[in-house]
Image (spheres, rainbow, N blue to C red):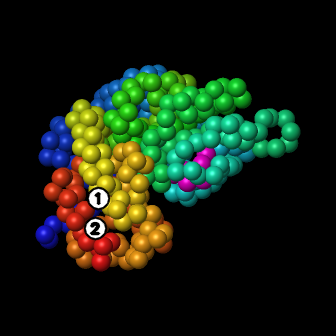
Amino acid sequence: MTQLVDLRSDTVTKPTAAMRAAMAGAEVGDDVYSEDPTVVALEQRVAAMFGHEAALFAPSGSMANQIALQLVVPPAQELLCDANAHVVTYEFAAAAAIGGISSRTWPFAGGEIDVDLVASMIRPDGYWAVPTRAIAVEQTHNLGGGFVIGLDTLRGLRAAADAAGIALHCDGARIWHAHVATGVPFAEYGALFDTMSVCLSKGLGAPVGSLVVGSAEKIARARWIRKRMGGGMRQAGILAAAGLYALDNHVERLADDHRRAQRLALALAPYGVVDPERVHTNLVVLDLAKSAVDAPALAAAARERGVLMSVLGPRTGRLITHLDADDAAVDHATEVLTGILSA
Ligand SMILES: Cc1ncc(COP(=O)(O)O)c(C=O)c1O
């Protein structure tokens, strides 16, 4: 098979012909003047989905997260999150550099969260210590292999945040996957958080776009923060149309990606590199600690046979199923990877 199977990320998808047609036909206007009807429609739709008053379209998930963090944590105050959270792993200290925000982390446990531990870390005002203003969680968790945080845990964090009078933010880049995996309605997730970021370009197949979700007052401030960060876009309805198309057509199909990831995990499990029970959605993180091949060697051998995977560390690899990888593609990847691991 010569066709390349790219399982490095669910961000590698390309817009389908139907999505491109929706983009080409989009009604547009200048969104910095709030005059792009397609952007406004997307923002209203996403806000309503999560039961919030308003939403704001942003160019990337990182910007959406950073806008939200600036909304809930003033400069020189503190955010709590896990040590492998996207906001402290992949966003290049933006919270500190742009928002003046101090971040403190709890130990990463594969996506599981010890609510009592987090609650005990919250620092109140008034002791000349940096006061905690928000807790951030990631649903689903990227480095947690697509782990879905349970509702009880989220409710526990909400109660801890309320008791301390602080905010709860959700990096919901893949909240769609959590919804499809669990059946928990979007509005039930939305009710738990003060702010959310959600991505249209991770698994849903849109080329660009994320939204910040929150109260009308917060989103009015978010519009100002986005402009200051250079994220004000003009005829962005072309992009918002892709998002609307994705919400209509590409959410429920995520179940196919989850099924394929599970099949991949079950095939790789006999090699001791993954526990299929921890594969909740479309991510498969490989623990190669005890394998004969390390992650770069596995990725290089797979690439030679037309399969691309991510190397997250010397002994950690990652595969993600998505819209552009059908059953045949994932079966081919499975065959290649099992072939290398069994050699
Ligand atoms: C959980 C999570 N949050 C945020 C982001 C950031 O998105 P972007 O690459 O659009 O900035 C990503 C990207 O993969 C992610 O996985």
Q: Judging from the image, what secondary structure is the residue with disc 1 in?
A: helix
Q: Which residue is mark 1?
A: 267
Instruction: Evaluate whether residue 237 shows in this view.
Output: no
Residue at far right of view: 127
Q: Is residue 194 above or below residue 338?
A: above
**Mark 1 touches mark 2? (CB < 8 Å):** yes
Residue of label 2:
338
Residue 200 - label: none
The amino acid beneath tag 1 is Ala
Range of magenta residues: 81-86
Residue for point 24% across, 69% down: 336
Please identify the quarter of the rendering in which residue 123 is found.
top right
Toward the viewer: 176 or 120? 120
Determine whether 170 is above or below 91 in the image: above
Badge 1 residue CB within 8 Å of ligand 1: no
Q: Label 2's element?
A: helix
Around disc 2, counting alpha carbons within 10 Å, would you say few (fewer than 14), some (14 to 19), or many (20 or more)? some
Residue appearing at x 13%, y 69% in the figure: 1
The percent position of residue 113, horizontal first and vertical second, equals: 58, 42
The amino acid type of the residue labelled 2 equals Thr
Left or right placement of residue 142 versus residue 208 in this view:
right
In the rendered image of this protein, does residue 211 appear above or below residue 202?
above
Q: Position of residue 275 (x, y in %)?
A: 41, 54
Q: Nearest the camera: 265 or 16? A: 265
Picture quarter with the C terminus: bottom left
